[in-house]
Amino acid sequence: MTRTVVESKTKTVIIGFDEPFAVIGERINPTGRKKLAAEMEADNFETVIKDALEQVACGATILDINSGAVFTNKMAQDPRYADNNFVEPPLMKKLIEIVQQTVDVPLCIDSSVPGALEAGLQACEGRPLLNSVTGEEERLELVLPLVKKYNVPVVAISNDDTGISPDPDVRFAVAKKIVQRAADFGIPAHDIVVDPLVMPVGAMASAGQQVFTLVRRLREELGVNTTCGASNISFGLPHRHGINGAFLPMAIGAGMTSAIMNPVRQQEMEAIRAANFLMNHDPNGGEWIRFAKVLEAVEGGMTFAEASAAASQAAGGRRGGRRGRA
């Protein structure tokens, strides 16, 4: 069975066909979050710390760290800040260091800037997930050597120099190409986590069906684990969490093994916990029973984040200090 191992200094997460669904928390990302980007520009990382703690308490087993900030004020003073190659590497290093001091889960280093990816790899303790490589020739030549050098798994996004194809067969072919090129570098298929690219169902009625079919093919024909940006499926639609909450168990049933998503959303996390139980990835329903207590606390008036944090603190007091499975 395909097993993608991601590690922090003290915890191991296995993304795999017979493992609980891996939730990769997406919130430490300044893209589209002006307040967070402004805080980062001012060397204020209070929200980063809050987001790290909250996401882990709510069920994230891996945290995505994205350094794609635009420093508007510094850019006006120094033109170098207009260049992401200048901004992102030191920011990524700082974010990794802060998050590692805050929580003990493995990390996913997320940037389009190769220098930021390497800065993150150098700062990371353990075996992080790298996000990402695409089928574009330039990207393959820049990222795959880093994957090999640091012996880490990588997210492979199914677009290439022609862009994102609406044809799922083309996206499968791009994923296959990446897996083959990775093999040329000595990178095994179990260290490739393919993102087949989820399209918005509001714009493409067959988007969900496409993903489910692609995930099955990727699992059966290439033997790789899969991930996605889960909220893409509901982009532009009302009541998005209902759609996301239906999509995730269906994707898990088709064989998807992880998603980059917001774990602070109760509806989505409830769907994942139930799917893990139904897929026999939650022995004796232990995690579901523990999660039910969080839901009871929410019914009693706590927010989902508050209830999750209280449950996490209670469980933390009963755990030892050895390397554990997240």
Image (cartoon, helix red, strand yellow):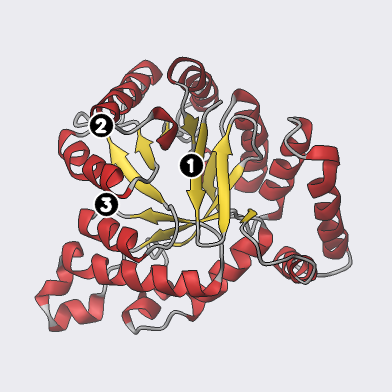
Q: Earlier in the sequence, mark 3 or mark 1?
A: 3
- Where residue 150 is drawn, which disc sits there? none
Q: Secondary structure at mark 2?
A: loop
Residue at left offset 29%, top offset 23% = 180
Residues at circles 2 and 1 in contact by the CB criterion of under 8 Å:
no
Percent position of residue 72, x then y: 24, 75
Let me know if residue 68 appears in the view. Answer: no
Question: Camera-side residue: 144 or 75?
Answer: 144
For the point 24% across and 31% down, which residue is it?
A: 160
Q: Can you say whether 1 is above or below 198 in the image?
A: above
The foreground one among 251 and 179 is 179
Query: Any mark on residue 112, and which?
Result: 3
Judge whether residue 204 can be spotted in this image: yes
**Residue at mark 2:** 135
167 lies left or right of 285: left
Query: Alpha-carbon neighbours of circle 3 within 10 Å: few (<14), some, or many (≥20)?
Result: some
Residue 98 percent coordinates (x, y)? 44, 75
Looking at this rendering, what residue extends furthest in the front direction?
322
Residue 84 position within the rendered picture, expressed as x and y whole percent measured from the top left:
20, 63
